[in-house]
Amino acid sequence: PPRPYTLVAELTYKCPLRCVYCSNPVHYAGGDELDTATWQRVFAEAEALGVVQVPLTGGEPLLRSDLEQLVTAARAAGLYTSLITSAVTLTRERLEELARVGLDHVQISIQGLTDEGATRIAGRSRLQDKLASAAWVRELGLPLTLNVVLHRENIEEVPQLVELALRVGAERLELANTQYLGWALEN
């Protein structure tokens, strides 16, 4: 019988950015979230079903104070963990701790290649912080993916985005389509 391969763990819908294309269900942001013990149970049950990887996403998963515990639980369940993040609140110390407890991969979203463009898209620009985070990821030996949601404001930047991915040592560049859900539908 077919088995699930991936559990997408949307840990929170809270996010410090307000990307106009965001597909998060905005009416849930600030609502109840699953607690640490429930996620720990879910990871163990997912592994028992045959799941092998868990992208830790949201919103912004770094806003969870228990993220290190959740990575530890996923690792204990034998799951490959990916942190899907905007990286705007990431510190090197936290990344080091996440790697220490078993984080396997980091994906950083890029909203624009200029401060003006990123601010227009996400409400603020933190490109330099994102690039610093990308460097930390590589220094710690973790695989790095850059993610860019494509839309009319950045479609012409694809060649420069490819160059950026190569420059920061990303193993993968994900060019994603806008999904018309959440903020994206409203906008």
Image: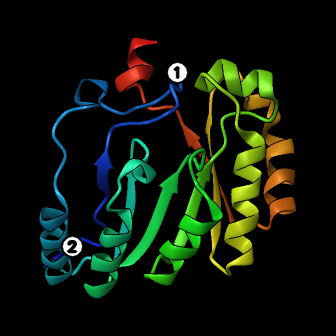
Marking on residue 67: none
- Residue 171 in view of the camera: no
Q: Is residue 1 left or right of residue 115?
A: left
Q: Nearer the viewer, residue 55 or 72?
A: 72
Residue appearing at x 44%, y 22% in the figure: 184
- Determine which residue is flagged by label 2: 43
Q: Nearer the viewer, residue 61 or 167?
A: 61
Q: Rounded to the nearest whole Å, what is the CA distance between mark 2 and mark 1?
A: 31 Å
Looking at the picture, how far across and down is residue 48, in whole percent?
Answer: 14, 83
Instruction: Tell whether label 1 touches label 2 (CB within 8 Å).
Output: no
Q: Earlier in the sequence, mark 2 or mark 1?
A: 1
Q: Residues within 10 Å of mark 1 (few under 14, many from 20)?
A: some
Residue appearing at x 78%, y 40% in the figure: 158
Q: How is the image coloured?
A: rainbow
- Residue 134 in view of the camera: yes
Marking on residue 20: 1
Looking at the picture, how far across and down is residue 96, in whole percent?
Answer: 58, 74
Residue appearing at x 16%, y 56% in the figure: 35
Specify the amino acid type for callout 1: Val
Q: Tell me if residue 146 comes above or below residue 48 in the rendering.
A: above
Indicate the secondary structure of the residue bearing disc 1. Answer: loop
Q: Tell me if residue 59 comes above or below residue 100 in the rendering.
A: above
Q: Tell me if residue 97 comes above or below residue 177 in the rendering.
A: below
Q: Quadrant of residue 144?
A: bottom right
Q: Residues within 10 Å of mark 2 (few under 14, many from 20)?
A: many
Q: Quadrant of residue 180?
A: top left
Q: Is residue 163 left or right of residue 25?
A: right
Looking at the picture, how far across and down is residue 139, in whole percent?
Answer: 74, 76
Residue appearing at x 63%, y 77% in the figure: 142
Specify the amino acid type for callout 2: Phe
Indicate the secondary structure of the residue bearing disc 2. Answer: helix
